[in-house]
Image: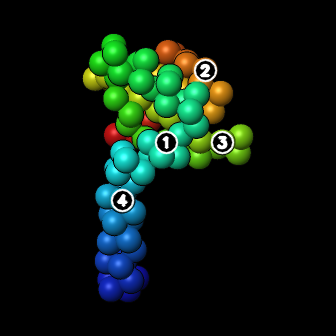
Amino acid sequence: MNHALTGSVDTTVQERRRGAFDTKEWWQRLSMDQKFGVYQLSKFGFELAFIRNLTNGPLAVVRRNRDYATVDQLGDVDLRPSIQIRD
């Protein structure tokens, strides 16, 4: 295995992950309905964690401590989503 190539791949993944944590960009990608849903959840201590890109549109994932919720493109909130979260 070429260590230079491996280092390059690791750096690219790290750069992509660092770029993924820009909440201003994420906020702009949300529909108006999603923004409203995320805003309502923020009143209960939830914060926008990340966005998952699904075939039917972006899914906003919000977090409060170890609790997660999702807001779909139509603004529907799921307080018990069945999603896999990586640590």
Q: Position of residue 23 (x, y in %)?
A: 36, 45
Q: Which residue is mark 1?
A: 51
Say which label, 1 or 4, has the lower sequence index. Answer: 4
The type of residue carrying mark 1 is: Ile
Q: Are marks 2 and 4 in contact (CB under 8 Å)?
A: no
Three-letter amino acid code at the position of disc 2: Asp
Say if 21 sits above or below 47 in the image.
below
Q: CA distance from mark 1 to mark 4?
A: 13 Å
Q: Tell me which amino acid carries mark 3.
A: Gly
The circle drawn on residue 19 is: 4
Instruction: Check disc 3: other Cα within 10 Å, few if <14, some if 14-19, many if 20+.
Output: some
Q: Are marks 2 and 3 in contact (CB under 8 Å)?
A: no
Q: Pointer 3: what residue?
A: 57
Left or right of 76 on screen, residue 60: left
In the image, residue 27 above or below residue 46: below
Q: Is residue 84 visible?
A: no
- In three-dimensional space, the C-alpha distance between marks 3 and 4, rounded to whole angstroms, equals 20 Å
Q: Residue at x 53, y 40 (%)?
A: 30
Q: Could you tell me if the residues under marks 1 and 4 are in contact, i.e. CB atoms within 8 Å? A: no
